[in-house]
Amino acid sequence: MLREATQEELMEHLGRYGTNDKSARQVVRELERRDLADKRRAGAKDRQAARRIERQELIEHEIRRAEAATNGYMVNKAGQRRGVTDVSLFTGSEARALRYASPELLRYWESHPRPSAGLTSANPRVVARARARSDVGRSRHDGGSLYRGIY
């Protein structure tokens, strides 16, 4: 009965039956239980916020590194036509990232795995298969003249 009572109802109950030690202890215990639950919820929210910030910092760092390694060529032509952004390649689904990543970015991900939602690495074999599917010879950005496929 006390668990379902509002704060005001608990205080009213305490005022009415506060002279009874058992009743007073029950109300105080319920108030303490609620305080502890509130503290736990606040702590969980703080930890979630810290994880979100940590993940955002990791993604920003990885985007900067990939941008430097790919000379800014991270989205393939199909992705550019669809309005895919560099950031979405790192924050969206893995399938979408592999579909719209440039050959340079796919090559980068083979040695620097893409962070996933759980902050774990993408499977390098999956990235290699995506590169093979893109049917790209040498990139126009690494001096090769043979270039077919996405661009």
Image (spheres, rainbow, N blue to C red):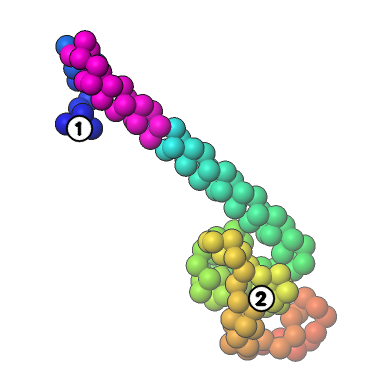
**Is residue 42 toward the left or the right of residue 64 in the image?**
left
Residue 35 included in the magenta stretch of the image: yes
Element under disc 1: loop
Q: Indicate the amino acid at tag 1.
A: Glu
Q: Residues within 10 Å of mark 1 (few under 14, many from 20)?
A: few
Question: Where on the picture, by quarter, is residue 129?
Answer: bottom right
Give the quarter of the figure containing the C terminus: bottom right
Can residue 134 be seen here? The reply is: no
Front-lying residue, 49 or 18: 18
From mark 1 to mark 2, how far is it between C-alphas? Answer: 56 Å
Q: Which residue is mark 1?
A: 4
Q: Residue at x 63, y 56 (%)?
A: 59
Estimate the x, y position of residue 51 in percent, counting from the top left: 56, 48
Q: Earlier in the sequence, mark 1 or mark 2?
A: 1
Element under disc 2: helix
Q: Residue furthest right?
A: 143
Above or below, 67 relative to 29: below
Give the quarter of the figure containing the N terminus: top left
Q: Indicate the amino acid at tag 2.
A: Leu
Q: Residue at x 73, y 74 (%)?
A: 111
Q: Magenta segment, which residues?
A: 17-37
Question: Where on the picture, by quarter, is residue 20?
Answer: top left
Front-lying residue, 52 or 7: 7
Estimate the x, y position of residue 77 in percent, counting from the top left: 60, 74
Above or below, 15 relative to 27: above
Q: Residue at x 65, y 50 (%)?
A: 57
Estimate the x, y position of residue 27 in percent, counting from the top left: 26, 22
Residue 81 included in the magenta stretch of the image: no
**Is residue 52 toward the left or the right of residue 137 in the image?**
left
Q: Which residue is mark 2?
A: 106
Total number of numbered discs in the rendering: 2
